[in-house]
Image (tube, rainbow, N blue to C red):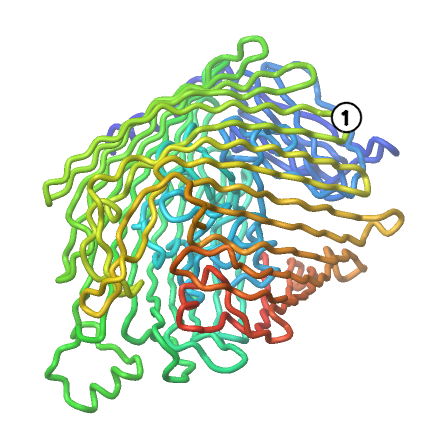
């Protein structure tokens, strides 16, 4: 840490001989009128500004080299420009009016492109959009992405599923570093709060080239909120109320930036009672969550760095059967108590025509599970009665399952100077991880994991096409106190091609291989997992999963019509899965880890209509499908049902009500009868949602208001990926969400 401070002090006094300033003017291309409040942002520098009332802007302290700037404003086409510094003239930008929604900058791929420029198909949504649609938490909100679902245990626990793959096959990134929180299990949630997160990106398909093992199925990339612009201070407070759970979540944050230093802090709290169906409340689906995030940044011309820290503490009930009908928020026995610490360090060194990214992450997951028999037996009857109603005496109980997972990871990337049409990155990534047990119940043994990987990738720009290719080598070593000592190695590659078939028509083809080494649970489990109510037995002879996926994506955008068609075929050798053997141990069914080759195929298809002259009216429709089979044609478990989503949305403004919108949404989920041997068929259902919102000026500040309702018809249904499905327990009924954000 002392050396880190010395580096900061040294760089702070570097001479400013290579500092550059960009000045310019932004106008409407049609009428040449200036456009105020336009956003200008250098994604690789993480530096930006907005234009003033006259359309002028100034950005200082830019290093030499070629840097991408993104210019965006609602109602205009987003512009992406490469600018070489030093520059000796002002930049004049003309923007074309457009009703196509603004494009976001894609951070999860290494070249920071707009999606229209990206060779890989990456989808992005803002947390604001998910919240206004009524998302209770992150795991609930990610299902708004086509091709993404969640294996859920009530509302408090959700495991992301991308095109039928989940658990360790989907890698999660937060604060720019990989999140490690015992994610091998279905009953383990994300352990993240949506507060302090700006947007979510989803890479569908193998991303092992960029991220190594565990990215075989895809990546969920959570982008943290940006620091304030230079020499500004921002503060806001947000609160949401949910009628179904009589719950709320609230957060408040403040951030301030000077020319060189940046700081932010945000805290949040959430409480939810058992969710309600049309017939009953689902006992012990209640949960509580507290979250705190802070960040510190420093930036000079040739160097930028940021430190971020997040602690998330939650108590989550684990439902077993319908029992006590209550609106208390303190979980009953059985429940989880989880604390996640995530500390990240991201630094970039800028040279004349290249740069070096150095990222470190430290995650510490403290997981406890409490069971009914864990209470001291000498409590008197009154105390026992209180315990039955969820009033825990935490000091009087010990966790049956108590595990601590500590992970240190690193990610180093060198962006080589551009060579003609080539942008090239070489890098190394790795982690060291230890798992330690402290409870009486040991599900997986004390163990350590060490990863190291090396890769190179290039983006090649041709006149009418772009090509991205790369290769990677990884090694993973797993050792356990039980005597296990395993090494797994893999070479992987990827190649992608993007071309504009016409001015409005983009085609992408991506071919990629991926791999996943078996995790500790799959190799070493031997015990009852009460969260899943099964006795799991691992298999030390498991080998790595290896896959090859083909993706084809077509995208058409015109002024009034858009459509997309994404198809994929994914073949996985040595696919690992759990299967019952018909026996019972300790009154729990026995499940064994086995392997077989498998294939998954399907895609997402949709269109967006915003007809002239009703440019304020939008109709969007999307269909998603995935099928998963073993080589023997048996269906894979936990494959989402096909679904069709239709949304009608209108946008409006008045003198006092800005950025107004209203929507109505119908999601139709079809029968899922392509099931594995130990699953049951799920019937079809339709869920109706609606909402409206906008902003008003209150005490000279902006107040954003949104109201939404989900499952408005109070439909009783069961989602195929609900872990409460075997007990016939319904998913959440009608819910009204009322929220506001006040910008101070």
Residue 385, position in %: x, y? 24, 88
Residue at the image point whose x is 58% and y is 66% from the top: 739
The N terminus: image quadrant: top left
- Name the residue located 44 percent from the left edge and 72 percent from the top edge: 272
Q: Is residue 517 left or right of residue 28?
A: left
Residue located at (46% from left, 50% from top) = 161
Question: Residue at (21%, 52%) from the top-left corner?
Answer: 525
Using the image as rendered, state which of residue 166 and residue 233 is in the foreground: 166
Instruction: Tell me: residue 223, above or below residue 414.
Output: below
Asked whether residue 398 appears in the rendered view, the answer is: yes
Splitting the image into 4 quarters, where does residue 327 fall?
bottom left
610 or 637, nearer to the observer? 637
> Callout 1: few (<14), some (14-19), or many (20+) C-alpha neighbours within 10 Å?
few
SS category of the residue bearing label 1: loop
The total of numbered circles placed on residues is 1
The residue under label 1 is: 502
**Residue 530: % across, % down:** 26, 65
Q: Position of residue 483 (x, y in %)?
A: 10, 41
Q: Position of residue 325 (x, y in %)?
A: 41, 84
- Front-most of residues 673 and 733: 673
């Amino acid at each position: 840490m002392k050396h880190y401070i010395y580096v900061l002090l040294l760089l702070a006094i570097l001479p400013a001989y290579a500092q550059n300033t960009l000045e310019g003017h932004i106008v409407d291309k049609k009428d040449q009128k200036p456009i105020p409040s336009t956003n200008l942002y250098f994604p690789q520098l993480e530096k930006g500004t907005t234009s003033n009332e006259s359309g002028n802007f100034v950005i200082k302290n830019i290093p030499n080299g070629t840097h991408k700037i993104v210019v965006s404003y609602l109602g205009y086409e987003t512009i992406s420009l490469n600018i070489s510094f030093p520059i000796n003239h002002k930049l004049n930008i003309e923007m074309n009016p457009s009703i196509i929604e603004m494009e976001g900058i894609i951070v999860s791929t290494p070249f920071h492109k707009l999606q229209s420029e990206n060779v890989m198909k990456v989808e992005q949504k803002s947390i604001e959009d998910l919240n206004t649609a009524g998302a209770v938490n992150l795991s609930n909100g990610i299902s708004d992405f086509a091709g993404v679902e969640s294996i859920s245990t009530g509302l408090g626990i959700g495991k992301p599923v991308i095109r039928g793959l989940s658990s360790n096959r989907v890698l999660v990134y937060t604060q720019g570093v990989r999140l490690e929180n015992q994610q091998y299990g279905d009953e383990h949630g994300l352990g993240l709060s949506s507060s302090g997160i700006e947007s979510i990106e989803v890479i569908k398909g193998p991303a092992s080239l960029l991220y190594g093992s565990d990215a075989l199925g895809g990546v969920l990339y959570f982008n943290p909120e940006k620091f304030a612009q230079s020499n500004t201070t921002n503060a806001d407070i947000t609160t949401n109320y949910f009628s179904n759970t009589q719950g709320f979540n609230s957060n408040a944050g403040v951030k301030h930036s000077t020319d060189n230093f940046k700081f932010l802090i945000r805290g949040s709290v959430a409480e939810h009672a058992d969710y309600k169906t049309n017939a009953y409340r689902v006992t012990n689906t209640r949960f509580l969550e507290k979250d705190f995030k802070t960040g510190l940044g420093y930036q000079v011309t040739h160097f930028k760095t940021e430190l971020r820290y997040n602690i998330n503490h939650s108590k989550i009930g684990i439902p077993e059967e319908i029992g006590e009908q209550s609106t208390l928020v303190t979980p009953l026995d059985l429940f989880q108590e989880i604390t996640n610490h995530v500390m990240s360090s991201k630094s970039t060194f800028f040279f004349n025509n290249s740069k070096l990214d150095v990222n470190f992450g430290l995650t510490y997951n403290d997981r406890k599970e409490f069971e009914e028999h864990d209470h001291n037996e000498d409590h008197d009857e009154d105390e026992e009665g209180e315990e039955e109603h969820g009033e825990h005496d935490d000091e009087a109980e010990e966790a049956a399952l108590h595990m601590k997972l500590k992970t240190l990871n690193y990610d180093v990337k060198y962006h080589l100077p551009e060579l003609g049409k080539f942008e090239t990155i070489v890098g190394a990534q790795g982690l060291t991880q230890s798992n330690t047990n402290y409870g009486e119940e040991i599900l997986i043994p004390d163990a350590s994991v060490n990863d190291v990987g090396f890769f190179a990738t290039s983006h090649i720009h041709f006149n009418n096409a772009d090509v991205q290719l790369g290769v990677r080598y990884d090694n993973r070593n797993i050792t356990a106190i039980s005597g296990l000592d395993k090494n797994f190695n893999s070479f992987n590659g990827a190649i992608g091609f993007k071309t504009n078939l016409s001015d409005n028509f983009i085609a992408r083809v991506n071919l990629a291989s991926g791999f996943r080494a078996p995790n500790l649970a799959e190799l070493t489990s031997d015990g009852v997992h009460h969260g899943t109510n099964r006795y799991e037995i691992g298999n030390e002879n498991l080998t790595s999963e290896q896959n090859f996926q083909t993706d084809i994506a077509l995208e058409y955008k015109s002024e009034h019509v858009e459509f997309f068609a994404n198809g994929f075929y994914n073949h996985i050798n040595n696919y690992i899965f759990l299967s019952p053997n018909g026996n019972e141990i300790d009154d729990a069914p026995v499940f064994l880890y086995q392997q077989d080759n498998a294939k998954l195929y399907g895609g997402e298809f949709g269109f967006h209509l915003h007809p002239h002259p009703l440019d304020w009216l939008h109709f969007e429709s999307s269909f998603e499908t995935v099928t998963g089979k073993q080589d023997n044609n048996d269906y894979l478990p936990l494959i989402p049902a096909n679904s069709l989503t239709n949304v009608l949305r209108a946008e409006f403004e008045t003198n006092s009500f800005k950025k107004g919108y209203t929507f109505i949404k119908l999601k139709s989920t079809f029968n899922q009868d392509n099931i594995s041997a130990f699953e049951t068929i799920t019937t079809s259902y339709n869920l109706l949602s609606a909402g409206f919102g906008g902003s008003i000026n209150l005490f000279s500040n902006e107040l954003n208001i949104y109201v939404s309702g989900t499952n408005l018809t109070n439909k009783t249904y069961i989602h195929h990926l609900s872990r409460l499905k075997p007990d016939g327990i319904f998913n959440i009924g009608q819910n009204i969400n009322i929220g506001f954000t006040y910008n101070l």
